[in-house]
Image: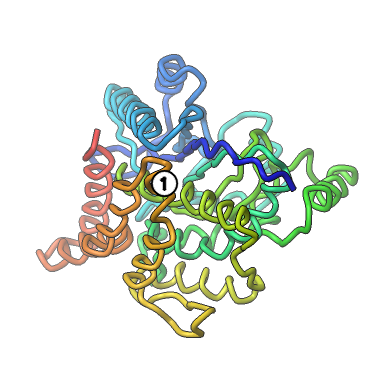
Protein backbone atom coordinates (compact mmCIF):
# COMPACT_ATOMS: atom_id res chain seq x y z
CA UNK A 1 0.00 0.00 0.00
CA UNK A 2 1.27 3.46 -0.90
CA UNK A 3 2.27 5.70 1.99
CA UNK A 4 1.46 8.89 0.10
CA UNK A 5 -1.17 11.15 1.66
CA UNK A 6 -4.62 11.28 0.07
CA UNK A 7 -5.91 14.60 -1.20
CA UNK A 8 -8.83 14.65 1.29
CA UNK A 9 -10.87 16.75 -1.11
CA UNK A 10 -14.54 16.84 -0.20
CA UNK A 11 -17.83 16.72 -2.06
CA UNK A 12 -21.40 16.68 -0.75
CA UNK A 13 -24.54 15.35 -2.41
CA UNK A 14 -28.03 15.98 -1.03
CA UNK A 15 -31.53 14.93 -2.04
CA UNK A 16 -34.50 17.24 -1.41
CA UNK A 17 -38.28 16.86 -1.54
CA UNK A 18 -40.48 19.55 -3.05
CA UNK A 19 -43.61 20.61 -1.17
CA UNK A 20 -46.53 22.97 -1.57
CA UNK A 21 -45.89 25.47 1.26
CA UNK A 22 -49.62 26.16 1.60
CA UNK A 23 -50.59 22.56 2.34
CA UNK A 24 -47.28 20.92 3.17
CA UNK A 25 -48.05 18.18 0.65
CA UNK A 26 -45.50 16.78 -1.78
CA UNK A 27 -45.52 18.27 -5.26
CA UNK A 28 -44.13 16.97 -8.52
CA UNK A 29 -41.43 19.18 -10.00
CA UNK A 30 -42.63 21.11 -13.08
CA UNK A 31 -40.50 20.64 -16.17
CA UNK A 32 -39.76 24.38 -16.18
CA UNK A 33 -38.32 24.17 -12.66
CA UNK A 34 -36.06 21.29 -13.65
CA UNK A 35 -34.89 23.15 -16.75
CA UNK A 36 -34.17 26.39 -14.88
CA UNK A 37 -32.28 24.67 -12.07
CA UNK A 38 -30.30 22.55 -14.52
CA UNK A 39 -29.31 25.62 -16.54
CA UNK A 40 -28.33 27.78 -13.56
CA UNK A 41 -26.48 25.06 -11.66
CA UNK A 42 -24.37 23.78 -14.58
CA UNK A 43 -24.49 20.03 -14.07
CA UNK A 44 -24.75 20.18 -10.26
CA UNK A 45 -28.48 19.48 -10.28
CA UNK A 46 -30.47 16.50 -11.47
CA UNK A 47 -33.83 14.78 -11.13
CA UNK A 48 -34.09 11.88 -8.73
CA UNK A 49 -36.02 8.62 -8.71
CA UNK A 50 -39.33 10.28 -7.74
CA UNK A 51 -40.86 13.25 -9.52
CA UNK A 52 -41.20 15.11 -6.21
CA UNK A 53 -37.47 14.77 -5.56
CA UNK A 54 -34.30 16.49 -6.78
CA UNK A 55 -30.58 16.05 -6.16
CA UNK A 56 -27.68 18.49 -5.94
CA UNK A 57 -23.95 17.92 -5.69
CA UNK A 58 -21.11 20.29 -4.86
CA UNK A 59 -18.03 20.50 -6.99
CA UNK A 60 -14.81 18.88 -5.80
CA UNK A 61 -13.85 21.17 -2.90
CA UNK A 62 -10.43 21.57 -1.32
CA UNK A 63 -11.81 22.24 2.16
CA UNK A 64 -15.05 22.63 4.08
CA UNK A 65 -15.03 26.41 3.59
CA UNK A 66 -15.19 25.94 -0.16
CA UNK A 67 -17.88 23.29 0.29
CA UNK A 68 -19.88 25.72 2.43
CA UNK A 69 -19.99 28.36 -0.30
CA UNK A 70 -20.91 25.87 -3.01
CA UNK A 71 -23.59 24.10 -0.98
CA UNK A 72 -25.09 27.41 0.12
CA UNK A 73 -25.30 28.49 -3.53
CA UNK A 74 -26.94 25.20 -4.52
CA UNK A 75 -29.51 25.30 -1.74
CA UNK A 76 -30.27 28.99 -2.35
CA UNK A 77 -30.75 28.48 -6.09
CA UNK A 78 -33.09 25.52 -5.68
CA UNK A 79 -35.09 27.47 -3.07
CA UNK A 80 -35.27 30.58 -5.28
CA UNK A 81 -36.42 28.74 -8.39
CA UNK A 82 -38.83 26.52 -6.46
CA UNK A 83 -40.45 29.63 -4.99
CA UNK A 84 -41.04 30.98 -8.50
CA UNK A 85 -43.13 27.88 -9.12
CA UNK A 86 -45.02 28.10 -5.83
CA UNK A 87 -43.01 25.32 -4.20
CA UNK A 88 -40.39 24.93 -1.46
CA UNK A 89 -37.63 22.36 -0.91
CA UNK A 90 -37.20 20.46 2.35
CA UNK A 91 -34.14 18.44 3.41
CA UNK A 92 -35.58 15.61 5.49
CA UNK A 93 -35.19 11.92 4.83
CA UNK A 94 -38.94 11.18 5.00
CA UNK A 95 -41.92 13.46 4.42
CA UNK A 96 -44.04 13.57 7.59
CA UNK A 97 -47.36 12.51 6.05
CA UNK A 98 -47.02 11.76 2.32
CA UNK A 99 -48.47 8.54 0.94
CA UNK A 100 -45.84 6.62 -1.03
CA UNK A 101 -48.45 4.94 -3.21
CA UNK A 102 -49.43 8.33 -4.63
CA UNK A 103 -45.91 9.14 -5.93
CA UNK A 104 -44.63 8.56 -9.46
CA UNK A 105 -41.07 7.80 -10.49
CA UNK A 106 -39.24 9.95 -13.03
CA UNK A 107 -39.69 8.78 -16.62
CA UNK A 108 -36.05 8.20 -17.54
CA UNK A 109 -34.50 4.99 -18.80
CA UNK A 110 -32.32 4.62 -15.71
CA UNK A 111 -35.26 5.00 -13.32
CA UNK A 112 -37.59 2.88 -15.44
CA UNK A 113 -35.02 0.08 -15.33
CA UNK A 114 -34.58 0.55 -11.59
CA UNK A 115 -38.32 0.37 -10.99
CA UNK A 116 -38.59 -2.80 -13.09
CA UNK A 117 -35.58 -4.43 -11.39
CA UNK A 118 -36.59 -3.64 -7.80
CA UNK A 119 -40.31 -4.27 -8.27
CA UNK A 120 -42.45 -3.45 -5.21
CA UNK A 121 -39.43 -2.46 -3.15
CA UNK A 122 -38.83 0.56 -5.40
CA UNK A 123 -42.36 1.88 -4.91
CA UNK A 124 -41.68 2.73 -1.26
CA UNK A 125 -38.49 4.72 -2.00
CA UNK A 126 -39.89 8.00 -0.73
CA UNK A 127 -36.66 8.76 1.12
CA UNK A 128 -33.76 11.19 0.83
CA UNK A 129 -30.12 10.88 1.86
CA UNK A 130 -26.87 12.78 2.07
CA UNK A 131 -23.59 11.49 0.64
CA UNK A 132 -20.10 12.73 1.50
CA UNK A 133 -17.12 12.03 -0.78
CA UNK A 134 -13.55 12.27 0.52
CA UNK A 135 -10.69 12.13 -1.97
CA UNK A 136 -8.45 9.06 -1.56
CA UNK A 137 -6.41 8.44 -4.70
CA UNK A 138 -4.88 5.07 -3.88
CA UNK A 139 -7.34 2.21 -4.46
CA UNK A 140 -6.02 -0.09 -1.73
CA UNK A 141 -6.08 2.80 0.72
CA UNK A 142 -9.77 3.26 -0.11
CA UNK A 143 -10.54 -0.32 0.85
CA UNK A 144 -8.46 -0.13 4.04
CA UNK A 145 -10.16 3.09 5.10
CA UNK A 146 -13.65 1.76 4.34
CA UNK A 147 -12.90 -1.21 6.60
CA UNK A 148 -11.95 1.06 9.49
CA UNK A 149 -14.44 3.90 8.96
CA UNK A 150 -17.38 1.51 9.25
CA UNK A 151 -16.99 1.69 13.04
CA UNK A 152 -18.08 5.35 13.00
CA UNK A 153 -21.10 5.03 10.71
CA UNK A 154 -23.62 4.61 13.56
CA UNK A 155 -22.30 7.76 15.21
CA UNK A 156 -22.94 9.73 12.00
CA UNK A 157 -26.40 8.27 11.61
CA UNK A 158 -27.37 9.14 15.19
CA UNK A 159 -26.37 12.78 14.72
CA UNK A 160 -28.10 13.13 11.33
CA UNK A 161 -31.44 11.44 12.08
CA UNK A 162 -34.27 13.32 10.34
CA UNK A 163 -36.97 10.75 9.54
CA UNK A 164 -39.20 9.95 12.53
CA UNK A 165 -42.51 10.12 10.64
CA UNK A 166 -43.84 7.89 7.87
CA UNK A 167 -47.27 8.32 6.25
CA UNK A 168 -48.55 10.46 9.12
CA UNK A 169 -47.35 8.16 11.89
CA UNK A 170 -44.59 8.62 14.44
CA UNK A 171 -42.65 5.41 13.83
CA UNK A 172 -40.80 5.53 17.14
CA UNK A 173 -37.58 5.46 15.12
CA UNK A 174 -35.34 8.46 14.56
CA UNK A 175 -34.25 7.29 11.11
CA UNK A 176 -37.10 5.43 9.45
CA UNK A 177 -35.36 6.01 6.13
CA UNK A 178 -33.02 3.08 6.74
CA UNK A 179 -35.99 0.77 7.34
CA UNK A 180 -37.12 1.52 3.79
CA UNK A 181 -33.67 1.59 2.21
CA UNK A 182 -32.52 -1.69 3.75
CA UNK A 183 -35.18 -3.51 1.73
CA UNK A 184 -33.05 -2.92 -1.37
CA UNK A 185 -30.35 -5.41 -2.32
CA UNK A 186 -26.67 -4.63 -1.72
CA UNK A 187 -27.33 -2.23 1.17
CA UNK A 188 -26.23 -2.03 4.80
CA UNK A 189 -22.74 -2.05 6.25
CA UNK A 190 -19.95 -2.74 3.75
CA UNK A 191 -18.30 -6.16 3.91
CA UNK A 192 -14.62 -6.22 4.74
CA UNK A 193 -12.17 -6.78 1.88
CA UNK A 194 -8.42 -7.39 2.11
CA UNK A 195 -7.58 -5.43 -1.04
CA UNK A 196 -8.92 -3.51 -4.01
CA UNK A 197 -8.36 -6.62 -6.14
CA UNK A 198 -10.60 -8.73 -3.91
CA UNK A 199 -13.30 -6.03 -4.01
CA UNK A 200 -13.05 -5.81 -7.79
CA UNK A 201 -13.35 -9.58 -8.20
CA UNK A 202 -16.58 -9.54 -6.22
CA UNK A 203 -18.01 -6.66 -8.25
CA UNK A 204 -16.96 -8.20 -11.56
CA UNK A 205 -18.68 -11.47 -10.69
CA UNK A 206 -22.03 -9.69 -10.42
CA UNK A 207 -21.32 -7.58 -13.51
CA UNK A 208 -20.35 -10.61 -15.60
CA UNK A 209 -23.50 -12.44 -14.52
CA UNK A 210 -25.59 -9.46 -15.61
CA UNK A 211 -26.86 -8.77 -12.09
CA UNK A 212 -25.58 -5.16 -12.11
CA UNK A 213 -24.01 -3.02 -14.82
CA UNK A 214 -21.36 -1.53 -12.49
CA UNK A 215 -20.58 -0.80 -8.85
CA UNK A 216 -22.96 2.20 -8.77
CA UNK A 217 -25.68 -0.37 -8.03
CA UNK A 218 -23.94 -1.26 -4.76
CA UNK A 219 -25.62 0.88 -2.12
CA UNK A 220 -23.69 0.15 1.06
CA UNK A 221 -23.57 2.73 3.87
CA UNK A 222 -19.96 3.38 2.86
CA UNK A 223 -18.31 2.40 -0.40
CA UNK A 224 -15.53 3.18 -2.83
CA UNK A 225 -17.21 5.57 -5.27
CA UNK A 226 -18.13 4.13 -8.66
CA UNK A 227 -17.33 7.41 -10.44
CA UNK A 228 -14.64 9.22 -8.48
CA UNK A 229 -11.35 8.44 -6.66
CA UNK A 230 -13.11 8.81 -3.33
CA UNK A 231 -14.67 6.96 -0.48
CA UNK A 232 -18.36 7.76 -0.26
CA UNK A 233 -20.27 7.83 3.02
CA UNK A 234 -23.98 7.21 2.46
CA UNK A 235 -25.16 6.52 6.02
CA UNK A 236 -26.55 9.95 6.92
CA UNK A 237 -30.11 11.16 6.77
CA UNK A 238 -30.21 14.47 4.92
CA UNK A 239 -30.09 17.45 7.31
CA UNK A 240 -32.56 20.36 7.19
CA UNK A 241 -29.94 22.78 8.55
CA UNK A 242 -27.01 23.67 6.31
CA UNK A 243 -24.68 23.93 9.31
CA UNK A 244 -25.42 20.38 10.41
CA UNK A 245 -24.66 19.09 6.94
CA UNK A 246 -21.30 20.84 7.00
CA UNK A 247 -20.48 19.47 10.45
CA UNK A 248 -21.20 15.90 9.40
CA UNK A 249 -19.19 16.30 6.21
CA UNK A 250 -16.23 17.80 8.08
CA UNK A 251 -16.23 14.95 10.60
CA UNK A 252 -16.23 12.41 7.76
CA UNK A 253 -13.24 14.18 6.20
CA UNK A 254 -11.37 14.37 9.51
CA UNK A 255 -12.01 10.74 10.39
CA UNK A 256 -10.55 9.73 7.04
CA UNK A 257 -7.40 11.73 7.69
CA UNK A 258 -7.13 10.50 11.27
CA UNK A 259 -7.20 6.86 10.20
CA UNK A 260 -4.67 7.46 7.46
CA UNK A 261 -2.48 9.28 9.98
CA UNK A 262 -2.57 6.21 12.23
CA UNK A 263 -1.43 4.06 9.31
CA UNK A 264 1.63 6.25 8.79
CA UNK A 265 2.59 5.42 12.39
CA UNK A 266 2.03 1.69 11.82
CA UNK A 267 -1.23 1.83 13.76
CA UNK A 268 -4.84 1.25 12.80
CA UNK A 269 -8.35 1.37 14.23
CA UNK A 270 -9.51 -1.99 15.51
CA UNK A 271 -11.91 -3.65 13.07
CA UNK A 272 -15.01 -5.12 14.67
CA UNK A 273 -17.35 -7.61 13.09
CA UNK A 274 -20.37 -6.15 11.31
CA UNK A 275 -22.56 -8.08 13.77
CA UNK A 276 -21.43 -5.70 16.53
CA UNK A 277 -21.41 -2.53 14.42
CA UNK A 278 -24.94 -3.40 13.27
CA UNK A 279 -26.09 -3.25 16.89
CA UNK A 280 -24.90 0.35 17.12
CA UNK A 281 -26.42 1.06 13.71
CA UNK A 282 -29.77 -0.13 15.04
CA UNK A 283 -29.40 1.93 18.23
CA UNK A 284 -28.71 5.03 16.14
CA UNK A 285 -31.64 4.27 13.85
CA UNK A 286 -34.00 3.68 16.76
CA UNK A 287 -32.87 6.23 19.37
CA UNK A 288 -30.83 8.89 17.57
CA UNK A 289 -28.69 10.62 20.19
CA UNK A 290 -30.87 9.86 23.22
CA UNK A 291 -29.69 6.42 24.40
CA UNK A 292 -25.97 6.30 23.57
CA UNK A 293 -23.90 3.80 21.62
CA UNK A 294 -21.77 0.82 22.59
CA UNK A 295 -18.08 1.53 23.13
CA UNK A 296 -16.68 -1.87 22.21
CA UNK A 297 -13.30 -1.14 23.75
CA UNK A 298 -14.74 -0.46 27.21
CA UNK A 299 -17.66 -2.87 26.70
CA UNK A 300 -20.14 -0.26 27.87
CA UNK A 301 -22.85 2.01 26.49
CA UNK A 302 -21.70 5.62 26.48
CA UNK A 303 -23.80 8.75 25.93
CA UNK A 304 -23.28 10.62 22.69
CA UNK A 305 -21.95 13.62 24.65
CA UNK A 306 -19.12 11.46 26.00
CA UNK A 307 -18.39 9.95 22.60
CA UNK A 308 -18.19 13.42 21.05
CA UNK A 309 -15.60 14.53 23.61
CA UNK A 310 -13.51 11.49 22.69
CA UNK A 311 -14.04 12.22 19.00
CA UNK A 312 -12.83 15.80 19.34
CA UNK A 313 -9.68 14.55 21.06
CA UNK A 314 -9.07 12.02 18.29
CA UNK A 315 -9.49 14.67 15.58
CA UNK A 316 -7.58 17.49 17.29
CA UNK A 317 -4.78 17.58 14.72
CA UNK A 318 -7.00 16.85 11.75
CA UNK A 319 -9.48 19.65 12.43
CA UNK A 320 -6.71 22.23 12.21
CA UNK A 321 -4.88 20.72 9.26
CA UNK A 322 -8.12 20.48 7.25
CA UNK A 323 -9.31 23.92 8.43
CA UNK A 324 -12.64 22.71 9.80
CA UNK A 325 -12.42 23.03 13.59
CA UNK A 326 -15.46 25.29 13.71
CA UNK A 327 -17.60 22.89 11.72
CA UNK A 328 -16.52 19.78 13.64
CA UNK A 329 -16.98 21.32 17.08
CA UNK A 330 -20.34 22.80 16.03
CA UNK A 331 -21.78 19.28 15.92
CA UNK A 332 -22.01 19.59 19.71
CA UNK A 333 -24.88 22.04 19.10
CA UNK A 334 -27.02 19.05 18.12
CA UNK A 335 -26.86 17.90 21.75
CA UNK A 336 -28.58 21.13 22.74
CA UNK A 337 -31.10 21.54 19.92
CA UNK A 338 -31.71 17.84 19.35
CA UNK A 339 -31.54 16.11 16.01
CA UNK A 340 -33.98 17.02 13.27
CA UNK A 341 -36.07 14.02 14.38
CA UNK A 342 -36.24 15.49 17.90
CA UNK A 343 -37.21 18.92 16.59
CA UNK A 344 -39.88 17.48 14.31
CA UNK A 345 -41.46 15.59 17.20
CA UNK A 346 -41.36 18.72 19.36
CA UNK A 347 -43.12 20.77 16.66
CA UNK A 348 -45.77 18.06 16.31
CA UNK A 349 -46.35 17.82 20.07
CA UNK A 350 -46.55 21.59 20.50
CA UNK A 351 -49.15 21.84 17.73
CA UNK A 352 -51.27 19.14 19.37
CA UNK A 353 -50.95 20.83 22.78
CA UNK A 354 -52.30 23.99 21.12
CA UNK A 355 -55.39 21.98 20.16
CA UNK A 356 -54.54 21.61 16.53
CA UNK A 357 -55.76 18.55 14.63
CA UNK A 358 -53.31 15.78 13.75
CA UNK A 359 -53.42 17.00 10.17
CA UNK A 360 -52.43 20.53 11.17
CA UNK A 361 -49.81 19.18 13.58
CA UNK A 362 -48.15 17.27 10.74
CA UNK A 363 -48.37 20.37 8.56
CA UNK A 364 -46.51 22.26 11.30
CA UNK A 365 -43.66 19.75 10.97
CA UNK A 366 -43.39 20.55 7.26
CA UNK A 367 -43.46 24.26 8.08
CA UNK A 368 -40.50 23.72 10.41
CA UNK A 369 -38.60 21.83 7.71
CA UNK A 370 -39.20 24.60 5.18
CA UNK A 371 -38.07 27.22 7.70
CA UNK A 372 -34.90 25.31 8.60
CA UNK A 373 -33.93 24.74 4.97
CA UNK A 374 -33.94 28.52 4.43
CA UNK A 375 -32.36 29.42 7.81
CA UNK A 376 -28.72 29.79 6.76
CA UNK A 377 -29.17 30.88 3.13
Q: For label 1, count other residues whose C-alpha is less than 10 Å away and answer few (under 14), some (14-19) or many (20+).
A: many
- Residue 8 in the image: above or below residue 264: above
Look at 28% across and 52% down and name the residue there: 330
Q: Is residue 183 visible?
A: no
Where residue 41 sits: x, y (%)? Answer: 43, 20
Report whether 2 appears left or right of 293: right
Where residue 130 sits: x, y (%)? Answer: 47, 46
Report whether 299 appears left or right of 86: right
Where residue 122 sits: x, y (%)? Answer: 61, 49
- Residue 72 in the image: above or below residue 35: below
Q: Is residue 374 visible?
A: yes
Where residue 341 sits: x, y (%)? Answer: 33, 61
Regarding mark 1 in the picture, which secondary structure is present there?
Answer: helix
Q: Quadrant of residue 360?
A: bottom left
Find disc 1 in the rendering and name its residue.
250
- Between residue 371 and residue 141, name the one nearer to us: 141
Amino acid sequence: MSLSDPSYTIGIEEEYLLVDPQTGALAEAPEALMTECGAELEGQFSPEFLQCQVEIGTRVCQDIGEAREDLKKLRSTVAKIAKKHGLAPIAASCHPFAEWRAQHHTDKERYNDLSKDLAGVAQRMLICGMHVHVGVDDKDQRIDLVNQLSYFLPHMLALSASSPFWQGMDTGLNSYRLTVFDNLPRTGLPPQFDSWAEYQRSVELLVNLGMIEDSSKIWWDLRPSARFPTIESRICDVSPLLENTLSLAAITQCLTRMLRRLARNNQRWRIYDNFLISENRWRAQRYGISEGLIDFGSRSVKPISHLLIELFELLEEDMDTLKCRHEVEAVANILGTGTSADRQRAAYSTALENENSEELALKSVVDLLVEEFHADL
